[in-house]
Every structure is written in C-alpha cells, then in structure tokens.
C-alpha cells in the first residue's frame, strides 16, 4: 500500500534462526519500492532540466576527465537529489538492505536536502504497485543481508547536460547473493519523444522485471505491454555515442554482414531498454567504461524474458558490493541467444588483446 516517508512497513518480517533473528524481505515489495521511487524521482530531474525549460541550474561537478572529451564524467544537482530521494526511500522501507549508489556518500547540502524533503513529503512508496502483474503466489522472501540495491540516479548525465533527454534514465536494480534478480529502468522524458498511451498523465515510462518465479518483464501501468518480436532478418546493433572506437569497431568488423543496422545512442539504460523492448538487437561494449549500477537493472529484466546481459567474455556479471564496481570486462546484451553467442565470439580477440596489454 502507499507508505508515508518515515513509517516502517510490513515489507519485511523477522524470523528466528539458530544464530538469532534474521530480517526477511519480500522481493516483490522491494521491487515495487524501487519502481515507485524511480518514477518518483522523475519530477526531481525535470525540475532541473527538461525540454522547453530554458536555462537550468545544473550545479555541474566534474568527477573526472576533461570537459568535452570522452573521459568526461559529470555530476549535476539532479544526480545528487535523485540519489538522496531513492536511497532515502529504500533505507526507510528496508533499513536492513544494503545500498550502493553511483554518487557514493553525498556530503550535506541544505538546498538539495530541502528539495528532496519536499519531494518526500509529497510522495508515497507504493508497495502494491506491481500486484497486478506479480501475484502473491509468485513472491519470494529473501534474507535482507543477502540483498543489495544498486542505484544510478541519472544515467546519461553527459546527455542530460547537452539537452539530449531521450537518452536519460534512472536505474535501480536488486541483487541477491551477487545475482541481478530485479530491475527498473525509468525513462523520465520518454513521452516527450514518443506517443503516450491513452489517458497517460506522465512523461515517464518505467520498464521493470524479475527473473525469479517467472514474473517476466512489464511496463508500469500498461497491462497490455509486451516486448516486440523483431524481424528475424534484422540485426540492429546499438553502441555508445561517445566511445565507439577500438574494441567496439573491431568487434563490429568481425560481425560483418550479420549487422543490418547500427545506431549510436547515449546512456546504458537507454540502450538496454531498446534491447529489452525489441527496437534494438544487440548492445555491445567490449571494454571497461560502464559500472555495475549501469547494467544491474537491465541484466535482471533481460533474464526475465530469456535474454542475456553478460560481460564480453560471455560470463555472468557478479554484483559484489565489496569488490570493484567497474565492468572492466565489458558488456554484451541481446535477447536472441544466437546474436549474443556470435557477439561474444566476435569480441574475443579484442578482449584477449586488452588482457595481454594489462599484464605486468
């Protein structure tokens, strides 16, 4: 049900074990909270920058690299406010669950905190928002200390600063013992660029899914949505706008005529959503440059529909909160197994070259 901020809920229970009391969490409830919060963060982002808004107060911070260069890693006030909002909501409803956010531990900022507090006062975490597609019989209770929530509060920050809002998303994923088991890709500007469904009152779209218990993948609020089945003869590859070089070009060259279309796009979440919905067939990035919070939600959603999101060696991505959060071995995502296998094979020489170059 709707949960007011500052109120603990029945989203978790306790059970007595040989070693004491363990907190057990409903996987459906925590995924619902992630979906509710990801969608709830959309107005926070749009207050900072949106189509037609004019000059915005980005509060830009350079986390690394050179402005305008490929390694530029910007952070804005919207990143910070969105993470405070989502992490605060998860922490409130599920205090025993670990959280990893892209922006790390944020320092106190009175203005940011005031904006987020206002959003919290106006918002509710709706733990029942997925019930229509996720019945109680398919729910799974999980020990809280085995879960972790991964947050990318504003994926595609570079595009956000450039006004290319179609590539922006908010990503929230849940892992269980290091495996991606639930994910939400919220696109706060989706219906600024696409026709909204009849009766829609929001510009945001959220794709969510869970591979546990045959829950599947869905779009929040659209009961009839299903991933499309692309033309079997098509092979549309999507790659980064800013980092399509070296291993990416080499891998595409080895795929050769199998590729029928190539689209460059911003944002890991955007590219994963295209593969999930069926408007793209492969996302390939066989090199370091993405992070676990970039892939976790899409990984879970693709698993839920029988797809694949692995490193470029074809191995499952392990989401260990205590290890490096970088996807140093790249990413390959595809719904079709034959496309995924062919891309892993095509990336192998580039991956071997990169491994050899890093040896002491």
Image (cartoon, rainbow, N blue to C red):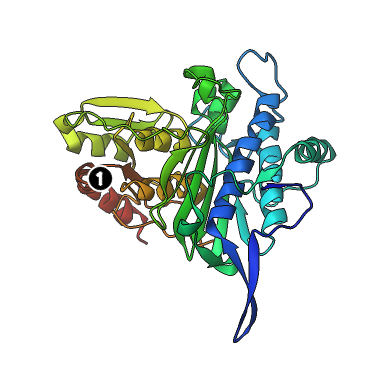
Q: Position of residue 216 (x, y in %)?
A: 40, 47
Residue position for label 1: 340
Q: Position of residue 255 (x, y in %)?
A: 19, 37
Q: Is residue 244 visible?
A: no
Determine the residue positioned at 61% across, 23% down: 201
Determine the residue positioned at 51% across, 56% down: 136
Q: Position of residue 44 (x, y in %)?
A: 69, 32
Residues 148 and 283: in front is 148
Q: What secondary structure is marked by label 1?
A: helix
With 90 as the anchor, is 184 left or right in this view? left
Q: Position of residue 180 (x, y in %)?
A: 45, 55
Tell me where residue 332 sits by quadrant: top left
Looking at the rendered image, the quarter that the C terminus falls into is: bottom left
With 5 as the anchor, is 282 left or right in this view? left
With 200 as the anchor, is 249 left or right in this view? left
Q: Is residue 177 visible?
A: yes
């Amino acid at each position: 049900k709707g949960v007011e901020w500052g109120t603990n809920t029945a989203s978790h229970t306790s059970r007595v074990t040989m070693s004491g009391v363990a907190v057990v969490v409903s996987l459906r409830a925590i995924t619902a909270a992630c979906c509710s919060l990801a969608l709830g963060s959309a107005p926070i982002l749009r207050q900072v920058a949106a189509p037609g808004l004019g000059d915005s107060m980005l509060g830009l911070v350079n986390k690394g690299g050179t402005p305008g260069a490929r390694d530029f890693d910007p952070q804005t006030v919207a990143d910070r406010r969105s993470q405070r909002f989502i992490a605060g909501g998860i922490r409130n409803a599920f205090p025993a669950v670990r959280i990893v956010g892209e922006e790390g531990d944020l320092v106190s900022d009175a203005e940011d905190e005031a904006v987020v507090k206002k959003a919290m006062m106006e918002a509710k975490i709706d733990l029942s928002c997925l019930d229509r597609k996720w019945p109680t019989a398919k729910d799974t209770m999980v020990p809280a200390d085995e879960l972790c929530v991964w947050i990318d509060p504003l994926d595609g920050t570079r595009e956000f600063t450039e006004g290319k809002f179609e590539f922006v998303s908010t990503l929230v994923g849940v892992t269980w013992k290091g495996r991606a088991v639930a994910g939400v890709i919220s696109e706060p500007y989706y219906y600024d660029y696409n026709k909204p469904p009849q009766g829609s009152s929001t510009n945001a779209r959220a794709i969510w899914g869970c591979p546990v218990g045959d829950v599947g993948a869905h779009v929040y609020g659209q009961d009839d949505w299903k991933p499309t089945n692309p033309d079997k003869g098509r092979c549309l590859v999507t790659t980064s706008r800013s980092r399509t070089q070296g291993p990416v070009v080499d891998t595409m060259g080895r795929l050769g005529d199998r590729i029928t279309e190539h689209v460059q796009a911003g944002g890991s979440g955007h590219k994963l959503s295209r593969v999930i919905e069926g408007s793209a067939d492969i996302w390939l990035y066989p090199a370091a440059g993405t992070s676990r919070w970039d892939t976790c939600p899409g990984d879970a959603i693709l698993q839920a529909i029988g797809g694949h999101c692995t490193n470029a060696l074809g191995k499952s991505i392990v989401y260990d909160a205590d290890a490096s959060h970088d996807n140093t071995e790249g990413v390959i995502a595809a719904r079709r197994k034959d496309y995924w296998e062919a891309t892993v094979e095509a990336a192998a020489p580039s991956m071997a070259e990169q491994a050899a170059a890093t040896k002491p």
